[in-house]
Image (cartoon, rainbow, N blue to C red):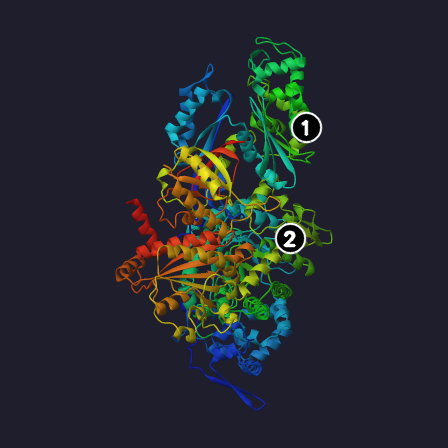
Amino acid sequence: MKKIIPLKDIHVPVPGPDEVYSFKILNEIFYFEGLKKLLGAADISKAGDRTTDLAPKNAMDREAARAILASLTLQYLYDNPLTADDGSVDSVMRAGYEIDLELFQSIAHMTMGDLKDHLLASNGTRVAAIGLALTPVMASALTKLMDVHELVYLPGKIFRPTKARTLIGTPKTLSFRLQPNHPKDNLDAISMMVYNDLAMGMGDCLIGVNPSDGSVDNIAAMLWHIDKLRRETGAPTQICVLGHIKSQLTALKQGAPVEILFQSFAGTDETLTGEFDVTVEFLDQAVETMKNEGPLKDIADQFMYFETGQGSEMTYRKHNGMDMATCEALCYGLCRRYDPFMVNNATGFIGPETHLNDFELMVSTLQDHFMGKLLGLPMGISPSYTLHSNSHLEGQQMAVQLATAAGANFFMDIYLGTDRMLAHFVNSGHDDQTLREIYHRNPAPEFLQWAVQKGIYIQHTDGNVERGPNWGNPRLFIKSDLEFQRLHEATPNAPGFENAGPRPAHKVQEVIRINQSVGREAVHSHLKPELFTGFTFREFVSTAIDHAEHLKNPEVGSKLSKTDLDSLSAEGNDVQIIITDGLSAEAVHHNVPDMIPVLMDGLKSRHYSLGEPIVTHFGRVKLAECISDVLDCNVAILLAGERPGGDALSSKSMSAYLVLKLKDEKARKAAAIYSEHEKIRYEYTLITNIYQGGLPPIEGGSVVAEKVMEILENQAAGNRLEDLLKAQKSV
Amino acid sequence: MENSQNIKEQVKMIGMDFGSTTSSAMIAVAGVGMNSATGRMAFSAPEIVYRSNVEFTPFKGAEIDASAIAELLDTWLEKGDNIFSGGVIITGLAALQQNSVHIAALIKERIGQAVIATVDDPNLESWLAFMGCAALLSRHFKNETLVNLDIGGGTTNPAAGQNGQVKTTGCFYIGARHFHFEPGTYRLINISEYGYSMLNHIGVTNEIGDTLCAGTLNKILDLYIEALKAIARGSLAFFESDIGQRLCQTSFILPPNVDSPLITFSGGVGELIYKITENEPIPSTTFYGDLGIDLAKRIISDPFFSKQITTIRPENMGRATVYGLTLHNTEISGATLFLPDTSALPLNDVPIVARLSMSCDLSDLLNSISVVAQRSGKACIQMLPVTDSEGGALPASLQQIKTLGDRINQALATLTIDLPLVILVPGNFGKALGNYATDWGKSSAKLMIIDEIPDRNAQFVNIGSPYRGVVPVSFYGIY
C-alpha cells in the first residue's frame, strides 16, 4: 500500500519570473507571456478557456504554442512550477511533484516532442513507468501535442488495475459504477434501479448514490440500504454514498458501511479548500482512517474514489490563470498521492460554461483519460451532457466509444441514462453492455462468476461471454408482482424494461428521447412576447448579446442592457412584475397567460400601485435587483423558467421570485440581524414548481398574490417573513 | 420560503375493524407530499408500524363487552398518539345500535375526532378491501379486470377494479359464521337467518344442537362455491333465483366484456386460503367455530379458483379492510386551500347535499346553498369537473373558475348560513376560487374551499383538522 509522504518533504524548485515565448509561422510571429498562457493556447479552443482568455486565438496561434511546447525539455517544465495568484506553489502543485525522480533524471533531457515520440514507440510497461516520473504539467503539455488517434492509442497500452471486493482495470475487462440517483433519495426507486442494472451485469466497480440530502443520518441510512441490496443479491461489489467526505467519515465513525470513501477534487488549492472544504492535510488523515478503520481494510488494496472534470476551477474563477486541462492534470497529481480505487472524470457535467458542444466534450474526455492513466490513475470516464449545452446524446455516445477504445477502466451506469437528480445524461446499462460486446470486454472476474451463476451471462468453454437468459430482467431479483409494481411506481421516468439485444426496446427509447426533446426545446426556445395577450407590457433585453451567451454566462442575464436601463427612472410603485425566460422560455409561455390575470386581479383588489409589467429577453434571477434599483419598487415579482431535466412535464416548470427591496430602514435592520449580513438590501421568497403537474398557474397566481400581500404588509420576505407569520398566528 | 408543495413530514394513521367474529387494528406512518407522477398531494411510502393480533370481538351475549373493548383499544393505541387520519368500521353484530355507539364513544375518548366510526357500510367495506389488498396488483395487471372477494364471517364483499381503480362493488350474505359450531366439532350452536335459508334451499332441516353430517356440509359448501363463482363471473342468473335474491344485500355487476377476471381473496377466509397454500400451519377444522377453514379448503380445491390462488398474491391477505381503512379511507386535500378560518374544523358527518358541475348556473348553486342553509350550514357541495365527449375530466379554465367564483359570491350575498359553506373541488384551484368568491378576502361570507378532492359518490364526508396546510377528507355512505 502506498505510503503518504509529508507535503513538506516533496521538493519543488523555486518558481522564477514568467518568460515570453515566441514562434514564427511564415511572416507572423506569435508571442506567449508565461507558461500558463502557452499551455492554454496549445489546446483546442474550449468555452471555459475562452471565458478566461486562455484559449488559442486561431489555428496558427495554437500551432505556434504547440511548437514551442514541443521544444521545451522535461527539465525546463520541472524547474518552472506554475504558481497560485499570490506567486506561491500551492499544496496541489506540490503534491504533483511526488514522482519517480530516478527515472525522471534519465529522461529529463528530452523535449516534450521527443517524449511523445518515445512513448508512442515504447511498450506499455515503459509508458506506465514513465507516467510515474512525470509531473502533472508535463502531462498537460503532452496532451496538447497529441491528436485523437494518439489520445486513444497511447493510454490503451497502460493498465492501472485496482482492487476492493472486485479487481477492476485489468486487460479485457470493462467495469461500471451504478449511479441510481433520485431527487428525493427514494429508497424504493434506488432499489428498482439497482436491481435492474445489476441484472444487466453492471455495477462491478461500485454501487454509488449521490444523495440529495447530504446529512450524516441520510448518508448512513442510504449506505445501509445499498448494503442490504448488495447482500441480498450477492453481487460482489462495493458501495458508496457520495456525500461530503466529512459527513461520510462521521457516518463511518457511527458504524455505517463506508466501504469506499468519496471526494470531489480540484486542481488549485484555492478551489479545493474554498469550494470543496477540504485540505491536503485533511485528506491525508482521511485516507489513513480508511486504511485502518474502513470495512474493507482486510481485503481491499485501495479505498478512495475521486471525481474530477475540466472546468470547476474556472467556474469558481479560482483557476490561478491556468487553462482547464492543466488544472485537471494538477488535480490528477493530487489523486495520485492517495492511490485511489477509482477516479471518475465527469467532463461535461457543468454545462456550456466549460464545454460548449460535442466536439469540445469529446476532446476533453480523451485528454482527461490520457492524462489520468499516464499519471498512474485507475481512470473512469463519464462524458455527460446537459440540455442547456449544445451537446447531445450522439456526441456523448461518440465520446464513450472513443474512451472505451482508449481503455477506460469504467463508466457510469444509470437506468436509461437519465440522472433523475442531477438533470444530466450519462451512460445507461444498455450502452454499457453494447460497449462490452463491441470491444469484447468482460466484467471484473469475481462479478462475472456471480453473473454467470445468476444466468445474467453465459461463459463458454473457450472463455467467450455472452448475454444469458436473465440478462436485463429485473424480475431476477424481484420475485413478487406486488413488489415489482411498488418499486416501479416509485421510479420516475421509467417507461419500461423491455430490451432488444443489448439495447432498450425502441418504444422505451422513444419515450426517453421525446422527454429529452421537450426539455431541450424548452431551454433553447426563445421568449415569444406575442403570446402574452390581455395585458400590456414593456419589452427589454439583458446584457447578453444572444441566447447562447445567456445560457453559458449567468452574469450577463443579471443586468438590463444599457439602452433599456437608461430608458427607466424611479417609479416608486408597490409592485413590479418581471417576466423573463430564465432557463426555459417554454415554461414561461406555458404558465404566464393563465397566471398574470389572476395575479393582477389579486394585487388590484388591494389597490397596490403596479408598474406596467416588464418582459425581458435572456434574463436571470438577479435581474430583479437591477430593475428594482432603478424603478425603486417595493416588491418585484420575477417569473422565470427552471432548468429542465429528463421529465417532459417538468420542463414546463416556472418559478416566482418575490424580491423585497428593504426600503424601510427598520425592516432592513431586522433583516440584517436575521441574516447576519450587515449590508443586506433585498430579501427573497421563492415559489417553485409552477406548472400543470405541480402548482397550476391559476392557483399559482392566487398563491403569489397572497404572498405578496403578506410581504408588503410585513415588509419582510423569505424565512424572516414565515417566522413573523408564525409568531402572529401563535398570538 | 419553504415551498408548501414539498412537505416531508410524516403523519400517523390508524385503521380499526370491529366485526361479528373478530376485530383488529393497524397503525401506519406515511409522508404527505406531492406525488411526482400525478402532481396531487398524497400519502407516500407508507410503513406499517403496528399490526394488532386478530382478536375475537368481545361480547357479553348480544351486547358488546365495553370494558374488554376498552382494554383492547388501550393495547392498540399504545403507539397511537398524534393520529392524523384513519377510520373505524363496525359491522355485523358489533354494529347493532347500542354496540356501535359504545365503541364509537370509547374511541372518541381516546383519540378524539381524528378518526370516524362508520357503521355497516357494505360497499365502503368492499371498496376498502380492494384498495387494501388488490389496488397495487391491479395496477400491475393494468389491462385486466380484477375481482377481490372479501369473505368474512357474515358477508362476502366483492369489488371489481381496473388499473387500481374500483369500478363496482357489492355485498352478499355469504360468510363463514352463518353456521356457528362448538369449536372442534360440527355441533350447531347457532344458525343465522341466512343459514336457515340455505338449509331450506338444499332441502335439509337441521336445528341448533344437531351435528351436521358430511353430506349436508358438502351441500352447503357447494352452495357457497356456486354463489362465489356467480359473483366472480358476474353471472346474474344465480342471483335471480330465490336463494340468490335472499343472499344479496347489494348487487354486483361486473363491467361489460369481462369474461375471466383475475381473482383475489381477503377477509378471514381469504387469509386462510393463502396460509394453506403457503403451507403455513392452520388450526384444525371448526377451530373458530364456523365454516371458515372448510370454505377456504373448498375454494382452493375448486378448479375455477385454484389456478389463480397460486399465481396471484394480493397484499395484506385477510387484513385488507383494516389496511384499506388505515391508508385509503382518507383523501388528502391540496396544499393551497381557501381556509380563512380553520377553527370550524374538524367537521364530521357532513352530508354532501349536491354534486354540481363546474359549469353550473347561478340557480343550481342557489338551490344547493339554500339546502345547506336549511341544515344550519352543516352540509357541503361537491363540484364535478366538466368532461369531454368521452367522459374524461377536463381541467378547469380560468374563465370557469372566475365565473363560478362570482356566482358563489352572489349566492352567499343573498343567503345567510351559520357555519362556513364547504365546497369540495376536484382540481388544484382552491385558493383561486375562494379568492374570486370573496373578492380576495374582502367579503365577510364564510367559505371553505377544499381542493384536490375527487368525487367518491358518497353520502357523507368528514373533514379533519388542518396539518401543515392540508386536511384529511374521508367519505362514507358510498352508493
Left or right position of A434 against B444: right
Q: Residue at x 61, y 15 (%)?
A: B197
- Label 1 residue SS: loop
For mark 1, name the chain. Answer: B
How crowded is the residue under tag 1: few (<14 C-alpha within 10 Å), some, or many (20+)? Answer: some
**A314 or B303, nearer to the observer:** B303
Q: Is residue B319 visible?
A: no
Q: Which residue is mark 1?
A: B235
Q: Where A352 falls versus B152 (above or below)?
A: below
Could you tell me residue B75's position as x and y percent?
A: 42, 27
Q: Where A556 falls versus B194 (above or below)?
A: below
Left or right position of B262 against B11: right
- Label 2 residue SS: helix
Could you tell me residue A197's position as x and y percent?
A: 60, 51
Residue type beneath disc 1: Ser
Q: Are marks 1 and 2 on the same chain?
A: no
How crowded is the residue under tag 2: few (<14 C-alpha within 10 Å), some, or many (20+)? Answer: some
Query: Which numbered marker is on residue A508?
Result: 2
**A494 or A709, nearer to the observer:** A709
Residue A576, image quadrant:
bottom left
* Tag 1 near tag 2, CB within 8 Å: no
Residue B300, image quadrant:
top right
**The C terminus of chain A appears in which quarter of the rendering?**
top left
Labels in figure, total: 2
